Amino acid sequence: MASDRRDQAVRAAVEHALLPDSQPVVALLDTAGVRASAAALRAAFAAVTDAPVLHAFAVKASPLVPVLRLLYEEGLGAEVASPGELALARAAGVPPRMTVLDSPAKTVAELREAIDLGIAVNADNPQELARLDTLVAARATAPPPVGLRVNAQVGGGTIDALSTATDTSKFGVALRDPGARAWIVRAFLDRPWLTRLHTHSGSQGVPLARMADGVRAVYELAEEINEAAGRRQVDTIDLGGGLPVNFASDEETPTYEEYARLLAAEVPGLFDGRYGLVTEFGRSLLARHGTVLARVEYTKTSGSRAIAVTHAGVQVATRTVYAPASWPLRIAAYDAKGLPKEGPAVDQDVAGPACFAGDLLAVARPLPRLEPGDVVAALDTGAYYFAHHYAYNSLPRPAVYGYTVRPDGTVRFAAVRPPQPVAEIVAESGGELRDALVAE
Ligand SMILES: Cc1ncc(COP(=O)(O)O)c(C=O)c1O
């Protein structure tokens, strides 16, 4: 079980001295768990369609080259949304034909690079499409697949900041706005090379039924375009990602299987083989397989509240610290040997190292009473957490290790990202430019 593997890994991390005084916070990734999620995703769609499906991992969820490589080995491509993410996917060896470029703010240079490399592009808006007109016209050969992102405006979820299909979302062409539908159909008829539709009605907090509504809206649009064109001009539909993750327990819900079945029931025409499919899942592939470990440095009380001051805070859990109601994290307590901590639960704040009062991973959380030298684990942090470092207080990026538990129970660690040396922080912070503002 994933939670047993995690306990074994925490103990081994302590025994292998992965949490020394000089690096009192570290991140772990359950390699077998990541592989299992990738396999579950592939199986879920293979069970409902024979159509070709590209599962393009949303690189933003875990922008780490070894992770992208692992997923590529598991048959997944990459959805990228910036030059940096594209470079990471390329460094991981993900080929152009398995890469998709989204992003609402692509520059001409980015668009040109993607097209020259043969990477599929989803245009966000009419102005971007006009740029693509120019780039495509200048080519002697056919461009790679180009699509248009549509906001089906089916509504949001419980987290405003992650609701991409609201009436006023910044992404894509708003399908229900006056005149938009007719404009989209015309845009396709005028551009024979425009062959894909894209939508992403997630992410976390959006009910599956609403995501399916978005997919249905885009499927119906594809049918209308193809009818008007008198041919299968739209040949591929990109469903985006957005499967929510259960951060409250070890139960994996919802599953890819549930979502694929729901889509197949709600939008059967999408799965009858006439359309190729692309998915762009991120959080659901990685979140549950990541754990941040941090040493408890001090414990104290303030007012009546017990507080454990640890080394994991805003730098590794930015969303939780700034939006705790939307992003609560489970915390597990281990002793100084890395064994699950026993004892009566006491309400405690689990605080981070940063110098502002809100730097808390959990407030009044019932846990066995923590002591200096204990280890706290922030669970389900494999996506959009430790790989998204926030450099408050010039705190360094922690090391990331993948782990696998061998049949004999021993744990093998593989370095995924080295810990950031302090000298690098100085260099990144203009260390070589010390006199830039004082020199004449
Ligand atoms: C276009 C697009 N695709 C995919 C994703 C991945 O979403 P998730 O990590 O929720 O699966 C996002 C997330 O923001 C996105 O904007």
Image (cartoon, rainbow, N blue to C red):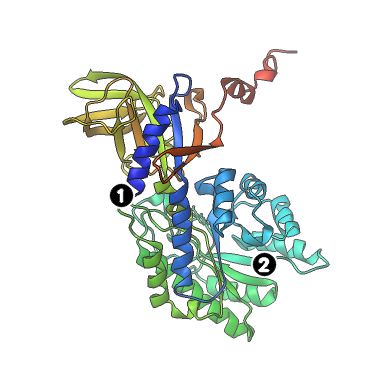
- Disc sitting over residue 99 in the figure: none
Label 1 residue SS: loop
In the picture, the quarter occupied by the C terminus is: top right
Q: Position of residue 416 (x, y in %)?
A: 55, 38
For disc 1, does the CB lie below 8 Å from ligand 1? no
Tell me residue 200's x, y (percent): 49, 61
**Picture coordinates of residue 133 (x, y %)?**
73, 65
* Residue annotated with mark 2: 145
Q: Find disc 1 in the rendering and name its residue.
A: 250
Q: Is residue 201 visible?
A: no
Placement of 250 over or under 264, stated as above or below: above
Disc 2 marks a residue whose amino acid type is: Pro
**Left or right: residue 362 compared with residue 343:** right
Which residue is drawn at the image coordinates 58% and 79% (left, top)?
225
Q: Indicate the amino acid at tag 1.
A: Asp
The residue shown at (41%, 28%) is: 15
Mark closest to the chain's N terminus, 1 or 2: 2
Q: Left or right: 189 with respect to 257?
A: right
223 or 276, which is in the foreground? 276
Identity of the residue drawn at 37% across and 51% down: 159
